[in-house]
Image (spheres, rainbow, N blue to C red):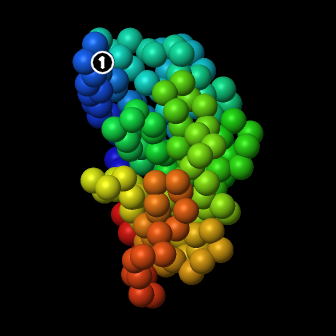
Amino acid sequence: AAENEIGQFWLEKHSTFARSKIRIFWKIRKRADFKHFNLKEYHGIALLDSNGKLVEDFVVGVGFNGSVKKVVAQPDLKIIVGGLFTEYQDESANRIIRLDRVGSVDDSFDIGTGANAAIYEIDLQADGKINLGGDFSVFNGLNKNAIVRLNTDGGVDPTINFGTGANGSVL
């Protein structure tokens, strides 16, 4: 990504009673990731409403200890974040984590030991399974050269075989 590129997308949630829009904002920089947004402490990720106003009940605390490279929102408004980080809010999060609507860790998403190197790409399938690409060679103790598919609970999907994987980064 280019220096100071702003990544953002809209996610609409429909229900019988209300329709809400959420914009997820993250900023990628080559030398450093943002630590403040709108003069408030937000380490690596912030949520904005449809008017561009900061969603203040999305609390990240000390946030990520490394770069955020990809953010994907699921239809249930849970947010999958991948990158170069190994911690979120001072807890282990080896390069991928799923957050709820208020920025808390979704403990039902269990990645085990996670990735041993960067995650650059996250693709959400229609069935909820999650494809990951990056620089990693191991995911949760399994040889997964740069590509792996996860089940909705964060576990490695054993029903797909990518063979020896990629011979380089998957971006």
Q: Write the residue at 40% across / 77% down.
A: 160
For the residue labelled by badge 1, is the local secondary structure a helix, a strand or a loop? strand
**Up-down: is 107 above or below 26?**
below
Frontmost residue, 99 versus 89: 99
- List x then y, in percent, for residue 148: 45, 70
Residue 93 in view: yes
**Up-down: is 167 above or below 78?**
below
The quadrant where residue 24 appears: top left
Q: Quadrant of the C terminus?
A: bottom left
Identity of the amino acid at label 1? Ser
- List x then y, in percent, for residue 156: 52, 68
- List x then y, in percent, for residue 60: 60, 28
Query: Is residue 60 found left or right of 8 in the rendered image?
Result: right
Q: Write the residue at 29% across / 26% down.
A: 13
Frontmost residue, 72 versus 31: 72
Q: Write the residue at 60% across / 77% down.
A: 142
State the residue position of label 1. 20
Q: Residue furthest bottom?
A: 164
Residue 28 in view: no
Frontmost residue, 33 versus 10: 10
Q: Residues within 10 Å of mark 1 (few under 14, many from 20)?
A: few
Q: Residue furthest right?
A: 90
- The count of marks equals 1
Q: Write the residue at 43% across / 72% down.
A: 147
- List x then y, in percent, for residue 89: 69, 35
